[in-house]
Amino acid sequence: MYDLIAEQYSQLFPPDQRRAGFIADELSPQAIRILDAGCATGDLSFELATRGYSITGIDFNKAMVNIAVERAAGGTLAPEFLHRNMLAIDDLGKYDGIVCFGNTLPHLLCEEDVLSFLITAGRHLNQGGRLIIQIINFNVMMKKSSFDFPEIETETTVFNRRYEVVEGGFINFMISTIDKTSGMKSSGSVKLLPLYQNRMLKLLKAAGFKDISVYKDYDHHLSDESEFASIYSAFSGNVF
């Protein structure tokens, strides 16, 4: 599905420059290496690289990774981008921070896989390392059986998104695009696992994380469960 929007991704979802600052504030001042799990076309990875971090970005969508690699070509402080599943990070070494933004985690379709990722992430964090995850606030989003996101329009594309609750409590995430030049319409869908805040907190604790905070924005305001997206910041303590 994401092949449909790979070329337009940065225009459809312009990078928020506050993200990198928020992450830097959460990490230890000595942090150097960061893993960006679900890097898409690399916007957050590049933002962090400009702050001096050594970045590895991974994503399961090959088209997006290829775009990120092309963007990085020739850069002196360019991140490394790899095409791989976020569950396959055992060979990547240790990091001072692991970030997972853009509602990536709900693409793992069972809590066992989510817990596996969290445990593996904890194992690959250095002493004092932090895991920072941003996901949609399903507590608000799924009060109804369906939710339509605001339409996004760029110079070339009209983009629409919709969530629908389907059998088994999963969410069917549907997108549609219209090419404004040709009028061509395209659509696709993917299943998501709704990770409600209480479940996320239990999974993080089960994975051994401590000092868990949930924020509603990049200004470090604590969640009141009304926000559009929630940001989880958790300390590994290097307990593995």
Image: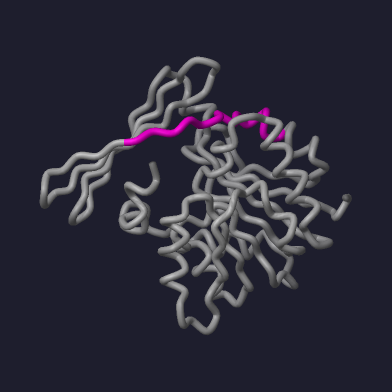
Residue drawn at point x = 31 percent, y = 55 percent? 8
Res. 23 image quadrant = bottom right
Res. 193 image quadrant = top right
In the rendered image, residue 177 lying in the magenta stretch gets the answer no
Q: In the rendered image of this protein, does residue 230 appear above or below residue 73? A: above
- Residue 4 in percent (x, y) is at 32, 47
In the rendered image, residue 197 lying in the magenta stretch gets the answer yes
Left or right: residue 173 compared with residue 177: right
Q: In the rendered image of this protein, does residue 105 appear above or below residue 54? A: above
Q: Quadrant of the N terminus?
A: top left
Q: Is residue 151 visible?
A: no
Left or right: residue 48 compared with residue 128: left
* Front in this rendered view, residue 212 or 62: 62
Residue drawn at point x = 67 percent, y = 51 percent? 88
Q: Is residue 69 visible?
A: yes
Q: Residue furthest left?
A: 182
Residue drawn at point x = 78 percent, y = 50 percent? 122
Q: Where does the magenta region start and end?
A: 188-201
Residue drawn at point x = 53 percent, y = 54 percent? 59
Q: In the rendered image of this protein, does residue 183 appear above or below residue 137? A: below
* Front in this rendered view, residue 161 or 2: 2
Q: Residue furthest top?
A: 167
